[in-house]
Image (spheres, helix red, strand yellow):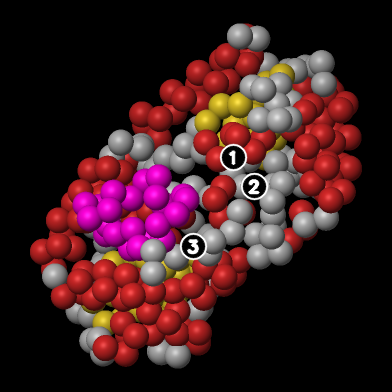
């Protein structure tokens, strides 16, 4: 529950074995949890580094007062659930019961047939907070588009076309996530990542989603992507602007490589379906509810 949009009461808490809250913070969040302590088990769910937020990531959390409130909320809870080892380590000084529950996708994505266009398409999906990430790849991306007039660039979520100095296709976010997936027509996906502490807390959900759709990805060789992308098999991990240019160019010119990497990426993604992974959540919540 997000403070301001929902507030659990003591009466409500008594009806549940556990209540899970998505990253409560601030005075309202801490006060709500303080009132619930002892009435049911409390779970703090988070998938961002709330203690090292940036103005581009979570602007409201850049103040020390708010970061301190996050620490208070984490301490009040009986369990913390998060998505990766980095976040678990970051939060471990404030709670000693942390469960890692990685991102998963619906198995149905593995059977989706993405739209095919006449022109080869490089794609990216992300919000406005990813401007810093996009800046890191803009120079090699411009060069790729300059040298391949028959290649399209498709942005979903935020239109970064003007930054590329090219005419790019743009699709806004869809209210239904299924419609979003159906609109992904990429032949090659990119995943740039600025070198910030906050970005290390991110998950590889973008690479997982692209892989489920059979799309090879070129990603920055740092967390989170270095924990998921298998370099040279399900995509490429790159370090320099020249590597960005070279790997994108290779994939543009080699349809067989794209097909092989996309197939391998889909197999890798099949290991991370909700239909199998839900047992991780079941065990975590059964354990906290039973006090084990």
Q: Callout 3: few (<14), some (14-19), or many (20+) C-alpha neighbours within 10 Å? A: many
**Separation of disc 3 and disc 2 at Cα?**
15 Å
Residue 10 coordinates in the image, percent (x, y): 84, 23
Read off the residue under disc 2: 49
In the rendered image of this protein, does residue 94 appear above or below residue 133? Answer: above
Say whether disc 1 or disc 3 marks the residue closer to the N-terminus: 1
Q: Nearer the viewer, residue 202 or 200?
A: 200
Residue 102 coordinates in the image, percent (x, y): 47, 37
Read off the residue under disc 3: 193
Query: Is residue 217 located in the magenta-colored stretch of the structure?
Result: yes
State the SS at label 2.
loop
Q: Nearer the viewer, residue 240 or 272?
A: 240
**Separation of disc 2 and disc 1 at Cα?**
6 Å
**Residue 183's quadrant in the figure?**
bottom left
Q: Callout 1: few (<14), some (14-19), or many (20+) C-alpha neighbours within 10 Å? A: many
The residue shown at (62%, 47%) is 48
In the rendered image of this protein, does residue 27 appear above or below residue 141? Answer: above
Residue range in magenta is: 214-238
Residue 141 coordinates in the image, percent (x, y): 38, 79
């Amino acid at each position: 529950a997000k403070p301001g949009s929902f507030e659990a009461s003591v009466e409500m808490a008594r009806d549940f074995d556990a209540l899970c809250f998505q990253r409560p913070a601030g005075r309202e969040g801490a006060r709500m949890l303080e009132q619930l302590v002892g009435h049911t088990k409390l779970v703090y769910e988070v998938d961002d580094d709330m203690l090292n937020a940036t103005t581009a990531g979570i602007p409201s959390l850049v103040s020390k007062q708010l970061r301190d409130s996050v620490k208070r909320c984490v301490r009040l809870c009986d369990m913390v659930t998060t998505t990766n080892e980095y976040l678990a380590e970051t939060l471990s000084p404030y709670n000693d019961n942390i469960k890692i529950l990685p991102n998963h996708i619906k198995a149905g994505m593995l059977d989706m047939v993405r739209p095919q266009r006449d022109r080869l398409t490089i794609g990216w999906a992300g919000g406005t907070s990813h401007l810093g990430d996009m800046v890191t790849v803009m120079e090699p991306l411009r060069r790729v588009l300059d040298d391949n007039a028959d290649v399209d660039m498709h942005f979903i979520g935020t239109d970064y076309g003007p930054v590329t100095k090219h005419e790019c296709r743009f699709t806004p976010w869809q209210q239904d996530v299924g419609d979003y997936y159906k609109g992904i027509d990429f032949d090659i996906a990119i995943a740039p990542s600025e070198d910030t502490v906050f970005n290390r807390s991110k998950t590889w959900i973008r690479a997982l989603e692209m892989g489920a759709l059979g799309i090879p990805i070129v990603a920055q060789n740092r967390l989170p992507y270095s924990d998921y992308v298998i370099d040279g098999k399900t995509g490429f991990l790159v370090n320099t602007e020249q590597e960005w240019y070279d790997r994108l160019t290779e994939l543009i010119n080699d349809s067989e490589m794209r097909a092989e990497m996309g197939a391998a990426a889909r197999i890798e993604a099949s290991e991370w379906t909700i239909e199998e992974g839900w047992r991780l959540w079941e065990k975590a919540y059964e354990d906290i509810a039973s006090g084990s």
